[in-house]
Structures are given as C-alpha cells and as structure tokens.
Image (spheres, rainbow, N blue to C red):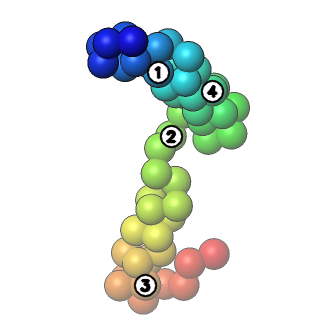
Amino acid sequence: MWTYQLIEAYDCTYYRVFTAVEEQVRQDLAARRRHLAEAETQRAARSRRRGHTAP
C-alpha cells in the first residue's frame, strides 16, 4: 500500500468511526459540552476567589 492509502484506510476504518462515537457519547452524556472537568475546576476556582465554597 502507498502511504496515502494507509492514511485513507485509517481515516475510514478507525478515526471517523471513533470521532462519531465520541460525538454521540458527548451528546448523550454532556449535552454536547466539551471540557466539563476543566470548566468545573475553573468555576470552583472563581467561586473560591470570591469567598464562596463550591457545592
């Protein structure tokens, strides 16, 4: 196989499938939001700076 054929095969048989599954999981579990853990950490840090405790 040529290099471009390997890349195309990888893209079609693994990468696209993986990203489609990942997107579906995000839709199902996270309402399409990304980086939930980081967002929660950022929210908690802001809350601490304001003198509140995170729930």
Residue at 43% over, 84% down: 48
Amino acid at dot 1: Tyr
* Closest to the observer, 5 or 22: 5
Q: Earlier in the sequence, mark 4 or mark 3?
A: 4
Element marked by disc 4:
helix
Q: Judge depth for marks 2 and 1 and give the one in front.
A: 1
Q: Position of residue 29 (x, y in %)?
A: 68, 39
Separation (CA) of disc 4 from disc 2: 15 Å
Residue under label 1, please give it: 10
Separation (CA) of disc 2 from disc 1: 27 Å
Dot 4: within a 10 Å radius of its alpha carbon, few (fewer than 14), some, or many (20 or more) residues? few
Separation (CA) of disc 1 from disc 4: 16 Å
Task: Look at the picture and state if 55 lies above or below 29.
Answer: below
Residue 39: image tag? none
Element marked by disc 1:
helix
Residue under label 3, please give it: 48
Q: Judge depth for marks 2 and 3 and give the one in front.
A: 2
Q: Earlier in the sequence, mark 3 or mark 1?
A: 1
Residue at 56% over, 78% down: 54
Element marked by disc 3:
helix
Viewer can see residue 43 = no
Q: Judge depth for marks 1 and 4 and give the one in front.
A: 1
Residue at 40% over, 68% down: 42
Q: Position of residue 9 (x, y in %)?
A: 47, 14
Task: Give left or right: position of 51 versus 4.
Answer: right
